[in-house]
Amino acid sequence: MKSPHLYLPVLLVVLLLAAGCTGTQQPVAPAPSQQPVTVVTTTPSTPIIPQDLAGSWVLSSLGIQHGTAITYPSTEITLTLNPDGTLTGYDGCNNYFGTYTLTGTTTPKGTGMTISGLGSTKKFCASLQSQEQQYLNILEKTAAYDIDGTTQLVLTGDLGDVLIYQRPGTLATPTVARGY
């Protein structure tokens, strides 16, 4: 007669194998239907922005809290508003990017707009550092925009600061802040 201790490991292996087979069963997929299946594809909606707002702009002046306008004629600062709600530009030293949202509200300074998520490249330009920081601070606090015709865009910040842009190629005419 063989020792019962030899059967114990074999019995344990059999019990473990049996325990693995007692799990829950996966549901069986039903047979495919004979009826045709209609597949509907959707594309993400693109924010609708006014056609006269979209595109490229060049900064012609910057005003701080209803103060004196500052003009940077030797440094071109740009802003491009893309139809997908993103923005890009050049602040005189670095390229920047972010997003904008039209809020749908009307304010005394124009149509509601917010700008968020601003980031930029990190090139250091000692002579333009103050201008760059001033510009990006005002841009990020945008609360409204107003378009005068199709050639001038005014962004007004929540503290009353303004950025006045012109369409490229229209900078020869003097800019007027229209009481901003």
Image (cartoon, rainbow, N blue to C red):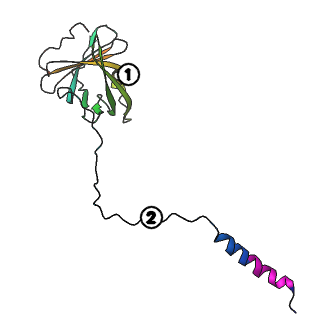
In the image, which residues are magenta? 4-12
The stretch drawn in magenta includes residue 136: no
Q: Which residue was labeled with disc 1?
A: 137
Mark 1: few/some/many CA within 10 Å (<14, 14-19, 20+): some
The stretch drawn in magenta includes residue 6: yes
Mark 2: few/some/many CA within 10 Å (<14, 14-19, 20+): few
**Along the viewing direction, whichever of 171 and 23 lies nearer the viewer:** 23
Disc 2 on helix, strand or loop?
A: loop
Quadrant for the C terminus in the image: top left
Badge nearest the viewer, 2 or 1: 2
The amino acid beneath tag 1 is Asn
Residue 148 location, quadrant: top left
| Left or right for 171, reference 101 | left
- Sequence order check, earlier mark of 2 and 1: 2
Majority secondary structure in the magenta region: helix
Q: Position of residue 142 (x, y in %)?
A: 33, 20
Quadrant for the N terminus in the image: bottom right
